[in-house]
Image: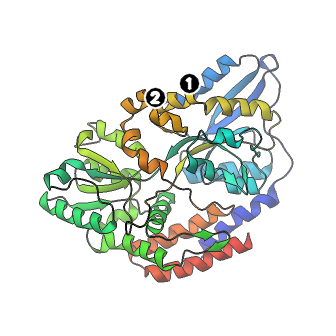
Amino acid sequence: MSRRRFLGLGGAVAGAALFGAGCGSGGSGGSGGASQLTFSLFPDPTGTVQRLVDRFNAEHEGEISVTLREMPADSGQHFDTIRTELQSGQSEIDIIGGDVVWPAQFAAAGWISDLSDRFPEAERADFLEAPVRANTYEGSIYGVPWYTDAGLLYYRRDLLEEAGIPEAPKTYAELKGTAREVSRRNNLPHGFVFQGADYEGGVVNGLEYIWNSGGDVLDGNRVVIGSPEAVSGLETERSMVADGLSPRGVSQYKEQESATLFLRGEAVFMRNVPRMYALAGDPNESRIDPEQIGVSVLPVADTSIESTSSTGGWNMFINARTEDQDAAWEFINYATAEEQQKFRALEGSVLPTRSALYEDREIRDNLAIVRLGEEAIRSSRPRPISPYYSDMSLAMSDAFTRSLNGDADPEQVLSELSTDLQYIVDQG
């Protein structure tokens, strides 16, 4: 096991050991005895989160007052900051805005509250299935889905139509054949771009190749990522570069780098997240018109496999040490309600987690990606739900990047990774 992976293991194991006495800031004081709560989230350039907080405070004046605390924009730094505070037991944060991969680790360490009684199954049924699953750990639910994300296949609809190709490819073989034909026909440098860098997005892309080839990572606590299907998935990812359909630099690409090439008109296909669609309407970002772009589900190894992508997005948790749990829940209930989710969708361009909003006419008319990407959003699935996911992700990121770069054979990479992941799970 590499030193990086070994050191990464310490995070999850240390979590439970370091959890000590303390409390969040929730409690009465100031402002006429109102409950003072702190809500943490990464920077929001749209300003819609602060507006939502201000609306809540105005409606609950004298009862509850929420302060928005800005966290690091980098997801890794954000996670480390939250984890360190929660481990100390002295965090001032009461309501945690958190990634979909955090609930199991935070719940296993006792850092966040079990919301099963406050958020019963009857109410969970109003939300998309995958985000609810991502917030569920050992039969209990620890977070409420706030907004969601998923991997989509973007393509040049206009160029496919000119080539007489009526729809997006369904299989990897079709993707490769179409990418090769259309890129040559239009003298484009690239057939397909995606995210292969050594970061969480690279893990997500690798997992999607594995899932859409019939493989998986975990079966309970048993690691199954060394299966022939998983190997086939990474072989397909690697072949995109080896066969010249994707640039060698794709192993350094994140979402923005991929979007830049595609929106410059330099690629036929792109795997990316929903928010990148909005860039097509910005003349400073794009040389192609949104009408020239199609959106579909990700391709699969063969049509017997149902296409899926990785569920992303953000959720709301309550610090288990917060004194006023009821007030914290009042804010979560407000922020994740249909009215506020619609506001955030229209004004902040984020995808709602309430199923009914995907039928809302105003949202469908004003947020095109909801119409175009709905099938992929509804068919997404969570990454492995494990208290040790952060450590597993470090190992997967390193392994997937080595495979993509051709530094090692995918079968060898996954054999080593399988051993490392099983060690992480067993030690946990």
Name the quadrant containing residue 419. bottom right
Query: Which one is in front, 13 or 278?
Result: 278
Measure how far apart labels 2 and 1 are at the Cα level.
Answer: 10 Å
Name the residue located 25 percent from the left edge and 61 percent from the top edge. Answer: 191
Name the residue located 25 percent from the left edge and 56 percent from the top edge. Answer: 267
Question: Which residue lies most toward the right here?
Answer: 21
Res. 347 mark: 2
Whole-percent x, y for residue 393 in the image: 57, 64
User: How many other residues sit within 10 Å of disc 1, few (<14), some (14-19) or many (≥20)?
Assistant: few
Q: Is residue 47 left or right of residue 162?
A: right
Q: Is residue 50 above or below residue 237?
A: above
Query: Which one is in front, 329 or 390?
Result: 329
Q: Is residue 246 above or below residue 287?
A: below
Q: Are marks 2 and 1 in contact (CB under 8 Å)?
A: yes
Name the residue located 51 percent from the left edge and 70 percent from the top edge. Answer: 398
Whole-percent x, y for residue 295 in the image: 33, 48
Name the residue located 40 percent from the left edge and 72 percent from the top edge. Answer: 404
Q: Can residue 290 be seen in the rendering of this structure?
A: yes
Whole-percent x, y for residue 307 in the image: 43, 59
SS at mark 1 in the image: helix
Q: Is residue 77 above or below residue 46?
A: below
Name the quadrant containing residue 234. bottom left
Mark 2 residue type:
Glu
> Mark 2, mark 1: which one is toward the viewer?
2
User: How many other residues sit within 10 Å of disc 2, few (<14), some (14-19) or many (≥20)?
Assistant: some
Res. 148 mark: none
SS at mark 2 in the image: helix
- Which residue is labeled 1 in the image? 51
Quadrant containing the C terminus in the rendered view: bottom right
Q: Is residue 103 left or right of residue 269?
A: right
Mark 1 residue type:
Arg
